[in-house]
Image (cartoon, rainbow, N blue to C red):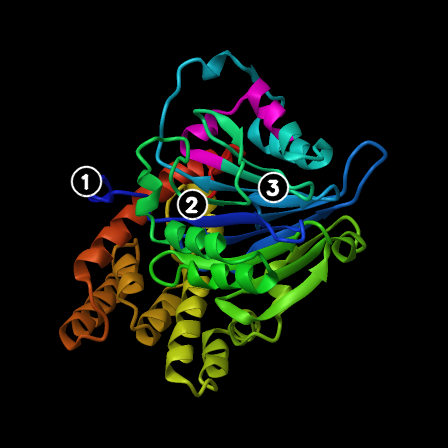
Amino acid sequence: MAVAVIIPSPVFSCTIFSAKDKHGRMWAGNNEDFYWFDFSTQIRIVPKTDSTFSFIYFNYNNLDFPQGGVNGAGLFYDANMVEASDVEGQNKKSNFPGETRELMLNVLRHCKTVPEALLLFDKYYIPELRTGQIHLADKEGNMGIITIDRSWLTSDHFQVSTNYNLSHQDDDYKKCWRYPIAYSMLRVADASLELMTAICDSTCQRKGVSTIYSNVHNLTSGEMWFYYGWDYDSPYKTTFEEMIALGDTTIMMRELFADQIVVKAYNAFAAGGFDAGLKILNTVGDARVKEEKLKLFLQGVLFDFESFIKSEKISVTKNEQLVRQVIEASNNEDLLYIIANQNISKTNKKLAEQKLRTIQTSGISVGLISGVVLGGSIVVLLVFVLKNRKKGKLAVP
């Protein structure tokens, strides 16, 4: 815990932003960041009924918590994790039946505008907002923020949130490197697909924490663009209506990007083992791109999401041969540090430590201290976050 204490802000993150362009069209977008690159993210599609809007939401495999979503009325939301705070009197509100998961789904089912959603949160107590805030936007032009302290409608033509409580008066959120980037880009330029995509790319997490996917929505037209695996040149373009037409179903996000080299490598690994996936990546000629895709691939095959859910702590695969193959293939200091501190065989632990020392000595990567801090902090913080997630609570990075 002492390692985590020296971190001034969360090491995990999401960047969320929305804006109205000069033609009155509403835009929204976000990066979904996780503690490692994970191939299990999903899009859940829910058709309308006689009394509810159709909607889609994003979640992780076997978790089924709406990390963010958009409905047929053009209402968008996503959430940031923030540093914990307590406010007296919050527990005097009513508890929503089914707790946070059902409340967020209720927003998507029944709310047409941001003001309608704010009324729900004024009425119901959400204990998870101690460590979270919700970012909303709608096609009517409304934008708003919900925190444990208070909620409000934004009067400006754009809105940005990262991992700091926006209701705090000390403006500590501006210390986040992603916030000023998104804020300054929206302040000086008119909202557009190009601008929203550029913000996703500019605030993408490529070191330590990983951005898994990004999405941009034109809430006015219903157009949507998805980005995956740090590739902002080849989006998956669709519309809300096209997605809803698929019916009541769930789509793996990676299935929309079957042509991406990292997805091909992961699919080859799933079908034929580690060497099959590595063979795909070895076809990449650009050394920088290859190293980037290799990092995503290795994170995806190494970390065990199922064990993570069950044990409430970071876990690597129990396949010791696969652990050894990852160690041999990786030159990533952060990854090797985490491996060396897991419950793995003595042989692989020694191999990871030797590889780590070689990297530090040769200068392939830098920052032993940052590696130690990142590894220790992730382990500690994952435990806290997963306890909330398992209970269907709002604890999204």
Q: Earlier in the sequence, mark 1 or mark 3?
A: 1
Query: Please, what is the three-letter code of the amino acid marked with disc 3?
Result: Ala
Q: Quadrant of the N terminus?
A: top left
User: Residue 99 at what x, y percent from top left?
Assistant: 57, 26
Identify whether 149 is placed above or below 105.
above
Query: Please, what is the three-letter code of the amino acid marked with disc 2?
Result: Thr
Which residue lies at the image location 41% right of the left edge and 49% below the top edge? 13
Residue behind mark 1 = 2
Locate residue 185 relative to residue 11 in the image: left or right.
right
309 and 84: which one is in front?
84
Give how far apart the Cα atoms at labels 1 and 3 are.
Answer: 38 Å
Secondary structure at numbered mark 3: strand
Q: Picture quarter containing residue 302?
A: bottom left
305 and 42: which one is in front?
42
Identify whether 359 is placed above or below 95.
below
Nearer the camera: disc 3 or disc 2: 3
Q: Which residues are magenta?
A: 117-133
User: Residue 19 at what x, y percent from top left?
Assistant: 57, 49
Q: How many circles with numbers are drawn on the protein?
A: 3
Specify whether residue 107 is in view: yes
Nearer the camera: disc 2 or disc 1: 2
Principal SS element in the magenta part?
Answer: helix
Q: Are marks 1 and 3 in contact (CB under 8 Å)?
A: no
Residue behind mark 2 = 162
User: Residue 15 at what x, y percent from top left?
Assistant: 46, 50
Specify whether residue 32 is in view: no
Residue behind mark 3 = 137
Identify whether 262 is placed above or below 309.
below
User: Residue 345 at what x, y percent from top left?
Assistant: 28, 60
Q: Earlier in the sequence, mark 2 or mark 1?
A: 1
